[in-house]
Amino acid sequence: MAITRIGGANAITGTIPQGNIANASLGAVTTLPFSTGVVLQIVQTVKTDSSSSSGYTYGDLGLSASITPASTSNKILVVANLNTATTGNLRCGIKLLRGSTSILLGDTASDRTRASVAIGGTSNIESYGSDITFLDTPSTTSSTTYKIQGSGEEAGASVYLNRNHNDTNSGTYYRGTSTLTLMEIAG
């Protein structure tokens, strides 16, 4: 393999002896020297419109993404950056699902509703940046969908994506964005 180092008067040219190269050319490289921890593919969904879910039951918030793993031993790194808000002083929960299965939930404790992220309410306007990061092991090579759901503390409570709740003290309202990113990691 010929090499050239350009450096003005110090230019060097020459050849690396064949015995010092494991593969004679880059085209002959068939495997990388590492097999795990490599990002194989990335899928992202960006949500710019607003959505909501009301009441005690978890409902879809319109943010989902699908990925097809290359191997059953690979993992999926799920990163959700959520622009969330709640109704007034009420609390809400956000949940991450793989298909119809809830993943990354708090444990069962007395009267607590399980969630991936719990959102508390303290004033007439509640806006939060809610983030979820989770390394999942779906153990499949089939297309797999991840999605975000929300639930309110009571019948009249709502959780929102990408909008402020009404602020009676200000005429300024904002519309944000939320993203759901899936990265396949070689296992």
Image (cartoon, rainbow, N blue to C red):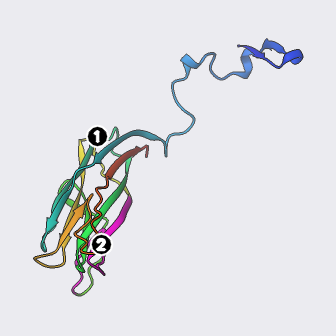
Q: Residue furthest bottom?
A: 110
Q: Which residue is mark 2?
A: 126
Q: Amino acid at mark 2?
A: Glu
Q: In the figure, residue 102 lies in which quadrant?
A: bottom left
Q: Nearer the viewer, residue 33 or 56?
A: 56
Query: Which of the two discs, 2 and 1, labels the residue nearer the N terminus?
Result: 1
Magenta residues, as a range? Answer: 111-133
Q: Are marks 2 and 1 in contact (CB under 8 Å)?
A: no
Up the image or down, 159 lies above or below 145; here it is below
Q: Amino acid at mark 1?
A: Thr
What is the x, y in percent for residue 129? Answer: 37, 64
Q: Which residue is mark 1?
A: 68
Is 30 left, or right, of 117 in this rendering?
right
Spatial CA distance of label 2 from label 1 is: 36 Å
Whether the magenta-drawn stretch holds residue 113 is answered as yes
What is the x, y in percent for residue 91? Answer: 25, 77
Q: Residue at x 36, y 56 (%)?
A: 81
Q: Nearer the viewer, residue 43 or 161?
A: 161
In this view, the mark in front (2 or 1): 2
What is the x, y in percent for residue 42? Answer: 38, 41
Secondary structure of the residue carrying tag 1 is loop
Whether the magenta-drawn stretch holds residue 5 is answered as no
Secondary structure of the residue carrying tag 2 is strand
Q: Residue at x 88, y 18 (%)?
A: 10
Q: Residue at x 52, y 29 (%)?
A: 31
Is 184 left, or right, of 28 in this rendering?
left
